[in-house]
Amino acid sequence: MQKIVVINSKGGSGKTTVSVNLAASLAACGERTALLDLDPQASSMRWLKQRPKDLPPISGIAGFRSDSNLTRSFQLTPPADTTALVLDTPAGLDRRGLEAATRGADAILMPVMSSDIDIHAATHCIADLLLGSRTSSSGSRRFGIIANRVKPNTRGGKRLERFLENFDIPVVATLRDSVNYTRSVETGQGLIDLPRWQVQKDRGAWDDIVEWVAALKQSSGEPTKGPLRVGLGGAVRLAFGRSSA
């Protein structure tokens, strides 16, 4: 099972948009996909509830919820046949929380927007992630950035481009500022599920993201065995001060 974590300590960066579209894209490629929502806003779970039944299935795990009758590990365990687990993480994670959420991750994706505030927050988040990985080279190999809601030939777009040049981390894809994302999220679909003619300008970015994830899976050799949930409860506790069951 491949564990893919979508992360950024700043809210409003596009984590849920990336998470649900990645889950939909992987499901469309034949992966048995699970979507683990660690954010108390529950946006990913709301999207999944609206997902049409005739689309490739995605299992949902409400990781932000705590049941005193169940162990935390059991609550966070995806179905046994899962081949791809996508994590939608909460905002506000500090270094320890980021390390907990990404522990055991096969791929880490960070959406970054182009405002000064977003870039400043991303700088600290990237530093915390690479320090948490202990070895920057091994950490950065599985770490990719998604430039989110970028308008071409704008001051913000150029500012983001200059910022990303400072890191030895691949820019996996650039997502347009497109109404297609709003349309798809409102209906429980990913861009991959919409008519190709409607999303033609946006599909290429998701092809790039899926290819990057697939390349990491291929290069890792044997798939990771056993539960890939270690540290997730810690991430939730550190962010919101809750104890696990």
Image (cartoon, rainbow, N blue to C red):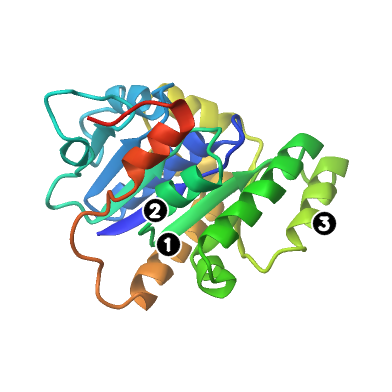
Residue 168 on image: x %, y %: 67, 69
- First in sequence: mark 2 vs mark 1: 2
Density class for disc 1 (Cα within 10 Å; few <14, some 14-19, many ≥20) is many
Circles 2, 3 touching at the beta carbon (< 8 Å): no
Secondary structure type for disc 2: strand
Residue 149 vs residue 228, the one in the foreground:
228
Q: What residue is shown with label 2?
A: 4
Density class for disc 3 (Cα within 10 Å; few <14, some 14-19, many ≥20) is few
Which of the two discs, 2 and 1, sits closer to the camera?
Answer: 2
Left or right: where does residue 88 sit relative to residue 35? right
The kind of residue tagged 2 is Ile
Residue 46 vs residue 153, the one in the foreground:
46
The kind of residue tagged 3 is Arg
Q: What residue is shown with label 3?
A: 162
Q: What residue is shown with label 1?
A: 213
Density class for disc 2 (Cα within 10 Å; few <14, some 14-19, many ≥20) is many
